[in-house]
Image: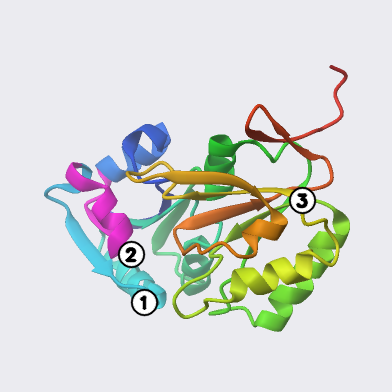
Amino acid sequence: MIGRIFALGIGPGNISNMTAHAVFVIGICDVICGYDRYVDLLGDMITEKQVVKTGMRKEAERCREAIRLAGEGHQVAVICSGDPGVYGMAGLLLEMLRDRDDIGFEVVPGITAATSGAAVLGAPLMNDFAVISLSDQLTPWDKIEHRLRCIAESDMTIVIYNPMSHHRPDTLKNACDTLLKYRDADTVCGWVRNIGRDGQESEITDLGRLKETELDMLCTVFIGSKDTTLTDGRMVTIRGYEV
């Protein structure tokens, strides 16, 4: 039997927010690989399966083990929070599987934090938007800052992943300083922590106050455009329909 790898998005991590195809693929796989926090979210879904868990910054090690196991004929799900093609493992796996015709591969999409977080806050993504991560682990900060300036100048809604951490306590503040050169301090913004999980929190605020807000890696931030308004306590980006 040919081995196969599925780069699989579990969305926020609960079964109600997974696609039916993702649930099916988890069922047919005999090996589950993933970051330990995300694997633990699957709970009883992966009872009696072989589980390979690694910690943060062990992505390449995790993928190499998944490829080794698939090479032995296993059906392997490499799980990712949200969508595997959005800051996930799909791209790395494809790079590492180059010229490996003996292993099948499929990307199983999932609900990413941009869309699931937007649903909590209202409808901030009704028009063009951009997604950016503030983590400089793989992308230099000067490149992140350049991209922020370009996005800010374009007046699109901005979704920010990985806004800050213990090792990067000033990244969100620095990003807001950059954006405030192009957008007013009263620009409607919002953030959501633990989207779709126990302990979910959210707040709608403005760019000036967001700059002073303490967040973490479990948060996703939404910064509105000039067309984003506060409507009955929800973030809404006006698309231009006649009402």
Q: Mark 3: which amino acid?
A: Asp
Q: Which residue is mark 3?
A: 186
Residue 18 screen position, x and y as percent: 40, 38
Numbered disc 3: secondary structure: loop
Q: Look at discs 3 and 1 and give the one toward the viewer.
A: 3
Relative to 31, residue 17 above or below: above
Residue 22 screen position, x and y as percent: 39, 41
Q: Marks 2/1: CA distance?
A: 8 Å
Confirm or deny contact between disc 2 and disc 1 (CB under 8 A).
Answer: yes
Q: Earlier in the sequence, mark 3 or mark 2?
A: 2
Residue 158 screen position, x and y as percent: 71, 54
Asked where in the image residue 173 lies, by quadrant, the reply is bottom right
Look at the image and give the residue range highlighted in magenta.
28-44
Q: Nearer the viewer, residue 180 or 145?
A: 180
**Disc 1: CA contacts within 10 A as few (<14), some (14-19) or many (>=20):** few
Q: Earlier in the sequence, mark 3 or mark 1?
A: 1
The residue lying at 70 percent from left, 40 percent from top is 125
Residue 75 can be seen in this image? no
Q: In the rendered structure, find residue 35 and report the number of the disc placed on it.
A: 2
Instruction: Judge left or right: residue 18 versus residue 162.
Output: left
The residue lying at 50 percent from left, 72 percent from top is 99
Residue 15 screen position, x and y as percent: 33, 36
Q: Which residue is mark 1?
A: 58
Instruction: Judge left or right: residue 241 versus residue 31.
Output: right
Q: Earlier in the sequence, mark 2 or mark 1?
A: 2
